[in-house]
């Protein structure tokens, strides 16, 4: 069976990581592409599993040597999607899940028109803010900035092929599986 590329985005706190983890647990063909970042790891994050954590100079060197499908600065930090990892997963027949912000997703969609784009929508703005506060990994100023960015990202959701509301992780995963079934049937 051929591999597919899924671009998955949503505002910070929308539940992207939780959904991907649950989806990968229920579907052994799902592989998350580990992206690069210059930000510091959060508590419990592991280099090479959650992200490839690199310094700014390393990041710039990788970008200049064309190692990234796309790269952007978001919230004052750099993020990028590695080309070799992405295409390696697809070539092996797996579903490569590229979890990236809206800016990166729009760039990736232009380069990968065959990709399936899914926007994870929070059930409400109030719930999104509650989730961010519960993470306790950002300051009040950072949360305020992320909420402002979330509204801008939600405004861009119309560029995606599919929108999935994450009011329940199991239901969101089920919706994504339904999307993939339809896409594989094409």
Image: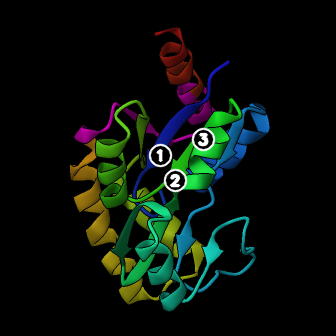
- Return the disc, 1 or 3, that comes first in the chain's sequence: 1
Measuring from the top left, give residue 30's x and y in whole percent.
69, 37
Determine crowd level at label 1: few under 14, some 14-19, many 20+ residues with C-alpha closer than 10 A. many
The colouring scheme, among rainbow, by chain, secondary structure or one colour, is rainbow
Q: Secondary structure at mark 1?
A: strand
* Dot 1 and dot 2 residues touching (CB under 8 Å): yes
Q: Please indicate whether residue 45 sits to the left or right of residue 156 in the image.
A: right
- Return the disc, 1 or 2, that comes first in the chain's sequence: 1
Q: Is residue 42 part of the magenta span, yes or no?
A: no
Instruction: Tell me which segment is drawn in magenta.
Output: 158-176
Gap in angstroms between the C-alphas marked 1 and 3: 10 Å
Say which of 5 and 14 sits in front. Answer: 5
The quarter of the rendered structure image containing the N terminus is top right
Gap in angstroms between the C-alphas marked 1 and 2: 5 Å
Residue at the spot of label 2: 99
Gap in angstroms between the C-alphas marked 3 and 2: 10 Å
Residue at the spot of label 1: 8
Q: Nearer the viewer, mark 3 or mark 2?
A: 3
Relative vertical location of residue 33 with respect to residue 51 in this rendering, above or below: above
Q: Please indicate whether residue 162 sits to the left or right of residue 178 in the image.
A: left
Checking the image for residue 96, the label placed there is 3
Checking the image for residue 27, the label placed there is none
Q: Which residue: 38% across, 39% down?
A: 112
Q: Which residue: 52% across, 49% down?
A: 98
Measuring from the top left, give residue 37's x and y in whole percent.
53, 75
Measuring from the top left, give residue 113's x and y in whole percent.
34, 34
């Amino acid at each position: 069976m051929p591999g597919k590329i899924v671009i998955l985005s949503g505002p910070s706190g929308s539940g992207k990581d939780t959904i991907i983890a649950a989806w990968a647990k229920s579907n052994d063909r799902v592989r998350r592409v580990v992206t690069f970042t210059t930000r510091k790891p959060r508590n419990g994050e592991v280099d090479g599993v959650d992200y490839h954590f690199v310094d700014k100079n390393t990041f710039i060197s990788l970008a200049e040597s064309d190692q990234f499908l796309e790269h952007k600065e978001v919230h004052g930090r750099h993020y990028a999607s590695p080309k070799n990892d992405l295409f390696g997963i697809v070539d092996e027949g797996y579903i490569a899940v590229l979890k990236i912000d809206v800016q990166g997703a729009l760039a990736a969609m232009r380069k990968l028109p065959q990709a399936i784009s899914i926007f994870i929508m929070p059930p409400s703005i109030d719930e999104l803010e509650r989730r961010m506060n519960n993470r306790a990994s950002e300051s009040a100023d950072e949360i305020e900035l992320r909420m402002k960015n979330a509204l801008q990202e939600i405004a861009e959701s119309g560029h995606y092929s599919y929108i999935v509301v994450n009011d329940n992780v199991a239901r969101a995963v089920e919706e994504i599986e339904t999307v993939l079934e339809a896409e594989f049937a094409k």
